Image: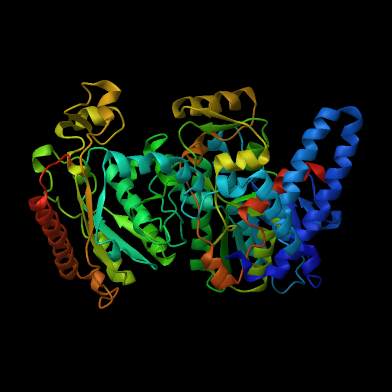
Amino acid sequence: MLARHGEHRQLIAIDGEPLRSDLPQSAYHRIYLAKKGASRKLASRVPHTHASVTIVHAALPEVIDIDEETARDRLIAEAKNVLAAAKELHVHKLVLVSSTDVYGAFATNPAYLTEEMAPRGADQSPILDALCTIEKLFENYVEQHRRTVVTALRPSTILGSRVRDFKTTFFDQTVIPTAMGFDPLVQFIHESDLLRALLEVIEKDERGTFNIVGDNILPLSRAARMLGRPTVPLPTPVLSTAAQVASKVGLEIMPSSYIPFLMHTCTADGSKARHDLGFVPVYTSHEALLSFATKGWRR
Amino acid sequence: MSNDIPFLRLLSAIGELKEHAKGAKREILEFADRDPAKARVLFKVADTLLKQFAKTSVYGKLKYALDMWSYGDEERYYDVDAFGMSNATVELMMPFFQFLYHHYFRVDVEGAKNIARNGPALVIANHSGTLPYDGAITNLAVYNNHPKHRYARYLVDDFVYYVPFAGTFIQRTGGVRACQENAVRLLDHGHMVMVFPEGLKGVSKPFEERYQLQRFGRGGYVKLAMRTGVPVIPTAIIGAEEIHPMLWKSEVLGKAMGMPYFPFTVTFPWLGPLGLIPLPTKWKIIFGKPISFKKFTARDAKSERKVKEMSQKIQAKVQSMIDTELEKRESVWY
């Protein structure tokens, strides 16, 4: 979609894993971003003929290592390399794709979290700690390079027919584990909506942080119902042990530090993106979920 | 909210619909040969999904309405509003609380004309009862006495959300966590919001302190009214303070059980679960004349003095309403 939109532009994709999308192979470079020297490698891949370079760093990984501490270190190392490359290239714009999860799932959250509130997720999970740190690193980058436009997008859980990460894995299970007595409200954004938001950010020079969320919220139990998956309510103390055991056995259910998200609501307000970016999601949370539910039907 | 670009939305929805329908058909046909039972299930799922997507076009809307009429209203039933309230839960609990309202507590209402017909408003009332029945019953008093059956939302203390089942239940029945952000948003949405400024101190009032208002918080609700210019309806609830006469409370025991306190009332825990049944007192709810906050601005909310002044004024108003009513009352029971 990005490639189609900007015909006058050149798009380069960089990932440590083999390419899974319909991009031409020539636009793809396989670089392990966490490795030492990745920043130079990354910078060398960008042709110098381009006057303005935009780097979009999608920080949230597809799979989370079983050891979350390692995952955190890797994520931070990746971001540092991206920033080093950005410095070398004198990029015009830096876009970070973070997550609304950085606010953390707390009982004391207001119904809709806004961008002014400080992210509190760092205490909850090493992965969210990494995301918070990365957001800070990007903020610090602005202070040193005032002319660079730095924008951070915080999408809620991304669903769609193509997207795949540890959250879609969670909703893809035959049985969805929940926390007994808790039914948090969840919020989704369709993958194409997130791409549309990215386009807005690439086209416009809008600095700052934006929540990118779909309209409507729904209880987790309702989401499971719409997916046609039975839920297994487990008492909260058992839940964290179960997640740990499952990850040891090799079952990728969910990072055990994400269990608060099964108990407390972490939903964000997308009105800032609406007003400042002019971004209006096409899909509601329900529709994003349905599109995800029917993904297997499209061959 | 999402209808800002209906055309784009419609296009994308129709695109999706066609794609899904095609994919689903192919899939089901493949299955039908091998596994007829599974194919039937798939057909059903496909039907539900198509129904979901069909909602966006005019034809789809008609068909959807027809389907809902014949199949029952599942979407409305299971979905929640922007603050997590579920119509299904409210409807489920309604008969029980209506029974309490009409036959158990035999609630009388005075000043029903003071209930805001429409637009945002704040209901400020005394809190009591060990178990907060007063919230639900006052909510019902608004609902029953409003010509269009207005359903007010109420602000609840944080601790509820840590308690399994209780937090979810309260959210589904219209409770919203008490904080300025939520309250402002509720009022912006035009809701009528019920606040019990005494908070936990009010619910856990010992019996000998009944009908004596505790400190009205830190005046958060006054700041709220000043910022939003929403009228305040002072409300007195008589009868609720005697439903669970509390002799003593243990905070240590409560903490061990994940509750803010553990009550010892006349009936609880001596009678076991039966002790949780409230005493059948006669209730009276008085809605006072709305106090306008139009003349205040957001800047006044920053002035501690002005906030304190208004808070004390409203507290005194509620207290005097309680006192006059208590003088008139002949018995707790009828």
Taking the image as shown, residue B129 lies to the left or right of residue B208, namely right
Q: Quadrant of residue B294?
A: bottom left
Quarter of the figure with residue A58: bottom right
Q: Position of residue A48 (x, y in %)?
A: 75, 69
Number of dots carrying numbers: 0
Residue B325 visible from this viewpoint: yes
- Residue A46 appears in the picture as rendered: no
Task: Please tell me which residue is depicted at 89% across the width and 42% down the height of the picture.
Answer: B26
In what quadrant of the picture does the C terminus of chain B appear? Answer: top left
**What x and y, as percent, mark residue A1?**
77, 61
Name the residue rendered at 73%, 62% in the picture.
B57
**Camera-side residue: B138 or B29?**
B138
Q: Nearer the viewer, residue B328 or B319?
A: B328
User: Residue sitting at 41 percent across and 41 percent down?
Assistant: B95
Q: Quadrant of the N terminus of chain B?
A: bottom right
The image position of residue B28, as x and y in percent, is 86, 38
Q: Residue at x 24, y 73 (%)?
A: B300
Front residue of B115/A139: it is B115
A31 with respect to A152 (left or right): right
